[in-house]
Structures are given as structure tokens and as C-alpha cells.
Amino acid sequence: MAKKSRMEYFRPEIEELIKKGVSIRSAWKIINADLPDYAKISYNAFFRFVKNHLK
């Protein structure tokens, strides 16, 4: 079984934000705001996830 990306856990929230017209950078900030420091997601990883899996 393949390891699940951290962003997969937030996929419904990310999809909803993007669908509402929120920019990728703003969606990244919103998602990261709820995460502890050790679990923060880099912008580049978040951007690639959105481009490869949601758009």
C-alpha cells in the first residue's frame, strides 16, 4: 500500500477552497494555519499537489 500524502488528508478542504475561487497561495496559508509547526506543508509541495491532483 502506497504512503498517503499529507495533503490527501486535506483534499476535501483544498478542493472546496479552490472551487470557491481561493488562490493556491491563500488555500496553502489556510491549511497550514491549522497545522503544528512540525507538520507544515511547503508551498512548492502544496502547489504541485493542487496542479497534479485537483486541476
Image (tube, rainbow, N blue to C red):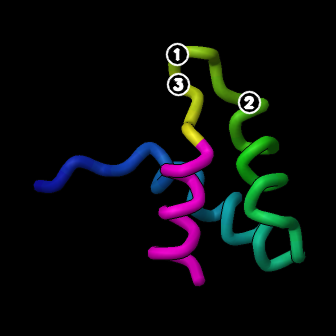
Mark nearer the viewer, 1 or 2: 1
Q: Name the residue beneath numbered marker 1.
A: 38
Residue 52 vs 11, above or below: the answer is below
Q: Name the residue beneath numbered marker 3.
A: 39
Question: Looking at the image, which residue is at 52% across and 16% down?
Answer: 38
Q: SS for tag 2?
A: loop
Q: Position of residue 54 (x, y in %)?
A: 56, 77
Q: Quadrant of the C terminus?
A: bottom right
Mark 1 and mark 3 in contact (Cβ < 8 Å)?
yes
Amino acid type at mark 2: Asp
Q: SS for tag 1?
A: helix
Q: Which mark is residue 34?
A: 2
Q: SS for tag 3?
A: helix
* Alpha carbon separation for disc pair 3 and 1: 4 Å
Span of residues in magenta: 43-55
Main SS, magenta residues: helix
Task: Name which of mark 3 and mark 2 comes first in the sequence.
Answer: 2
Question: Looking at the image, which residue is at 88% across and 75% down?
Answer: 20
Q: Position of residue 3 (x, y in %)?
A: 22, 48
Number of labels in the image equals 3
Question: Looking at the image, which residue is at 66% across and 27% down?
Answer: 35
Q: Position of residue 6 (x, y in %)?
A: 44, 43
Q: Quadrant of the N terminus?
A: bottom left
Q: Which mark is residue 5?
A: none
Residue 7 belongs to the span the image colors magenta: no
